[in-house]
Image (cartoon, rainbow, N blue to C red):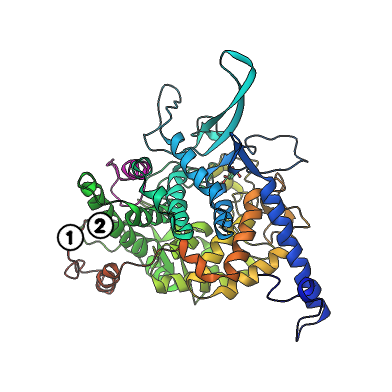
């Protein structure tokens, strides 16, 4: 395809209207892509002779491997999507089916087993001597559910990503036989049951401990962090599409449907922030005891951080990082916002506003390398208290305001969905200036993303795969549909009446066919 479109290598001539520099630029971009494909292929991990996933990083210069020699579920998603878009379906199929087998493994930590249905954060292929035969070996899969992970964090996002990838596999390959398999259907239901189980929680958002997603260290994201909610919503919608109707699952599907409505209402209404909403919070009354309180979570206006007062653009808005009683985490978390666009957890207007904000705050969120994982960083005393003085998460490094090239692919899907691919194109061009020269780092440091991260791995697979997915999707935007969730039309009409209702009055539920507790 590259050749058909013309360019240096294909016809030996310079493209019409282009300059020599353009053409050389195109040739070097092609070579970045070629290099990325070679590196991605080199990262493939084999199990019993067959490709099963990709290693997290393949950095020959690094002395401490830690667990970067493992296949991480979340890290494999962009690799899997790149392979799907290239028509190489087998590795994705094999990843889906083998990680499913790991799901039911009994692993314990301090005599306690993780909830049934939990997917591991990562796994390793070990070659061990065959029982009773010293000369022969066999491959075994060794999963980590967090019981060996630094900080013993629970990988809540793994199962959600697994469901999202499963749907993408079916949509892209046309092979629905995988999702229809009995064991796969059971796997989907186990993940759903774990997420939909009743607990003490009052909110429809999923309650998790700190570090349960891409940010897998203590970073003040315990409770109801946006990233988990966006993935949860997306996984619920993907699962609904794939679950085979059968008598035994009607309760589960009912619970799923209720949760989809309640979750989207809750996030759209209470996580959303823009100039108007900020001003509303600034003038909040507190200590309201009633069912229809305006300030339901008893947020004290003093919580509005000074940086936000300056930072909030007049056009645009975003979903805040977390919401708990008397606590709003006003940081901008990129993955949560981008995936809220992709999954339609955010409304159409909110989704456009998120992209408007990204454009308005380009010099902070993209700067020299896309994309900031969150903004701003915690500094000083706040850093000390929130991270526990974590030397890896110092201000503007790693998870604390570092810049992660892998986020390019989620940015690209969101921009394509909203028909604004030029935003992603611009970001990809910035990445291309240095990502290959810098050896595909895991993350960048400093406010402007000027340095390769202090402890960043080089040749980080999801940096490589994320870039490839962006390129492949920008060349073929329709393919983004394998990841996008379109909004339910019932929801649209129900919400428009609810959201326009006066917040002081009780919510008008008349538009809804069914009653939901929100
Ligand atoms: C780091 C990241 C995590 C990633 C892992 C492997 O722990 O925080 O998101 O999955 O590295 O790349």
Looking at the picture, does residue 182 appear above or below residue 436? above
Question: Which residue, as the protein is rendered here, is positioned at the far bottom?
Answer: 17
Q: Position of residue 501 (x, y in %)?
A: 24, 73
Q: Position of residue 475 (x, y in %)?
A: 60, 70
Q: Position of residue 59 (x, y in %)?
A: 73, 43
Q: Which residues are magenta?
A: 187-206
Cα–Cα span, label 2 and label 1: 9 Å
Residue 150: image quadrant is top right
Residue 4: image quadrant is bottom right
Q: 258 or 142, which lies in front?
A: 142
Looking at the picture, does residue 449 appear above or below residue 108? below
Q: Position of residue 410 (x, y in %)?
A: 54, 61
Give the residue drawn at x 54%, y 48%.
90
Q: Of the numbered discs in the image, which one, if any, rests on residue 515?
A: 1
Ligand 1 - quadrant of the structure image: top right
**Residue 462 in the figure: left or right of residue 239:** right
**Residue 172 in the figure: left or right of residue 35:** left
In the picture of the structure, the residue carrying the numbered disc 2 is 518
């Amino acid at each position: 395809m590259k050749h058909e479109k013309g360019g240096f290598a294909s016809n030996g001539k310079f493209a019409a209207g282009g300059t020599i520099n353009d053409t050389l630029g195109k040739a070097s971009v092609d070579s970045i892509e070629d290099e990325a494909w070679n590196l991605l292929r080199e990262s493939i991990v084999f199990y019993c002779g067959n490709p099963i996933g990709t290693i997290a990083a393949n950095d020959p210069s690094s002395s401490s491997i830690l667990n970067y020699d493992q296949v991480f579920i979340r890290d494999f998603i962009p690799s899997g999507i790149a392979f799907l878009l290239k028509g190489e379906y087998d590795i994705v199929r094999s990843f889906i089916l083998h990680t499913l087998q790991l799901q039911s493994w009994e692993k314990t930590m301090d005599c306690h087993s993780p909830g049934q249905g939990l997917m591991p954060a990562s796994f390793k292929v070990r070659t061990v001597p065959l029982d009773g035969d010293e000369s022969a070996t066999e491959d075994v899969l060794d999963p980590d559910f967090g019981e060996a992970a630094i900080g013993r964090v629970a990988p809540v996002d793994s199962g959600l990503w697994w469901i999202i990838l499963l749907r993408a596999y079916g949509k892209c390959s046309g092979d629905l036989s995988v999702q229809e398999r009995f064991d796969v259907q059971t796997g989907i239901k186990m993940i759903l049951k774990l997420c939909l189980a009743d607990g003490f929680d009052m909110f429809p958002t999923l309650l998790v401990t700190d570090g349960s997603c891409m940010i897998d260290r203590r970073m003040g994201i315990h409770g109801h962090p946006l990233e988990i909610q966006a993935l949860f919503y997306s996984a619920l919608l993907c699962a609904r599409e794939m679950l085979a109707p059968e008598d035994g699952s009607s309760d589960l599907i009912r619970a799923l449907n209720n949760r989809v409505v309640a979750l989207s209402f809750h996030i759209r209404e209470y996580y959303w922030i823009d100039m108007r909403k900020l001003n509303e919070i600034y003038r909040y009354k507190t200590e309201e005891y009633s069912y229809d309180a305006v300030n339901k979570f008893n947020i004290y206006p003093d919580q509005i951080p000074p940086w936000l007062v300056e930072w909030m653009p007049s056009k645009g808005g975003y979903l805040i990082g977390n919401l708990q009683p008397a606590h709003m985490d006003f940081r901008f978390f990129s993955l949560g916002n981008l995936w809220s666009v992709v999954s339609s957890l955010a409304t159409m207007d909110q989704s456009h506003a998120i992209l408007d904000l990204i454009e308005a705050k380009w010099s902070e969120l993209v700067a020299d390398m896309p994309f900031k994982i969150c903004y701003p960083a915690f500094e000083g005393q706040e850093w000390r208290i929130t991270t526990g003085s974590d030397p890896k998460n110092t201000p503007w490094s790693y998870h604390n305001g570092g810049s992660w090239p892998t986020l390019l692919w989620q940015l690209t899907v969101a921009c394509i969905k909203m028909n604004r691919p030029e935003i992603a194109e611009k970001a990809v061009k910035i990445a291309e200036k240095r990502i290959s020269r810098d050896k595909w780092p895991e993350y960048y440091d400093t406010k402007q993303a000027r340095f390769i991260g202090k402890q960043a791995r080089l040749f980080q697979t999801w940096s490589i795969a994320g870039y490839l997915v962006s390129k492949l999707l920008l060349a073929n935007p329709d393919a983004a549909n394998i990841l996008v969730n379109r909004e339910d039309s019932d929801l649209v009409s129900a919400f428009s009446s609810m959201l326009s209702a006066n917040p002081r009055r009780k919510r008008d539920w008349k538009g809804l066919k069914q009653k939901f507790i929100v």
